[in-house]
Image: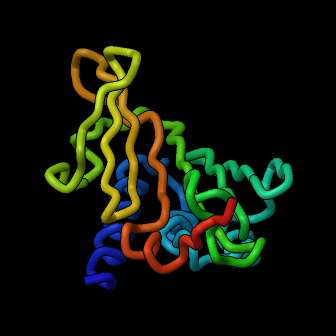
């Protein structure tokens, strides 16, 4: 089941990126996104695929491509919530946020939204779709003509949380 969830998440991410891609972009650049997996991919692998970050501050790096701005959080010790920390090395990806530069409708990104919980926010036009099982969150804006993707967040899957989230002692 874990492999199915990972493959589905990778499929969804690649579909999202393909839909929002700019014409003329190389297939290698499009596929680079698909290879970033929280709690698996390390900084060297990310930079091999995305190039050097445009900005780096401690365990956070920002990458800029034609299609999106990508913020990557690295590191062992990063809190996974109040009760635990990630059991990974300092150079391992723990979370990724993809902010598309091209306006992309949620209906076009290819996600099976029945796998997500839709939650409102303080802004009545902004919605969050969350799948703990897949480790994917999507924030959208209701434009009146459809929901526009503001960002996509990749986090550890529910299964990976159980395996790699070490309880903190207070």
For the point 42% across and 32% down, the residue is 103
43 w.r.t. 4: above or below: above
Which sits in the foreground, 39 or 87? 87
Q: Name the image quarter holding the C terminus.
A: bottom right
Q: Foreground residue, 132 or 154? A: 132
Residue at horizontal 40 percent and vertical 68 percent from the top = 157
The image shows residue 121 at horizontal and vertical percentages of 37, 24
Q: Residue furthest front?
A: 170
Image spot of residue 137 (x, y percent): 39, 48
Q: Residue at x 48, y 66 (%)?
A: 156
Extreme left residue here?
Answer: 114
Q: Nearer the viewer, residue 82 or 105?
A: 82
Q: Position of residue 85 (x, y in %)?
A: 63, 65
Number of dots carrying numbers:
0
- Left or right, residue 127 beside residue 23: left
* Horizontal side of residue 104 vs 39, given as left or right: left
For residue 36, say whether it is visible.
no
Quadrant position of the N terminus in the picture: bottom left
Residue at 46 percent of width and 70 percent of height: 161
Colour scheme shown: rainbow
The residue nearer to you, when weighing 113 against 24, is 113
Q: Is residue 157 visible?
A: yes
Q: Is residue 141 above or below residue 39?
A: above
Check the image and report above or below for 94 versus 2: above
Provide residue 37's location: percent of width, then percent of height: 52, 72
């Amino acid at each position: 089941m874990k492999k199915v969830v990972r493959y589905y998440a990778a499929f969804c991410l690649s579909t999202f990126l393909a839909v929002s891609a700019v014409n003329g972009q190389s297939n290698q650049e499009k596929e680079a996104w698909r290879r970033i997996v929280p709690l698996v991919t390390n900084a060297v692998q990310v930079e091999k695929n995305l190039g050097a970050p445009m900005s780096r501050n401690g365990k956070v790096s920002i990458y800029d491509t034609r299609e999106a701005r990508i913020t990557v959080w690295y590191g062992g010790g990063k809190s996974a919530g109040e009760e635990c920390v990630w059991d990974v090395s300092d150079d391992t990806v723990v979370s990724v946020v993809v902010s598309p530069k091209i306006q992309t409708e949620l209906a076009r990104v290819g996600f099976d939204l029945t796998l997500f919980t839709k939650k409102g926010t303080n802004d009545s036009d902004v919605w969050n779709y969350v799948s703990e099982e897949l480790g994917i969150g999507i924030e959208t804006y209701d434009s009146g003509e459809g929901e526009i993707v503001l960002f996509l967040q990749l986090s550890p899957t529910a299964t990976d949380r159980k395996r790699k989230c070490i309880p903190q002692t207070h």
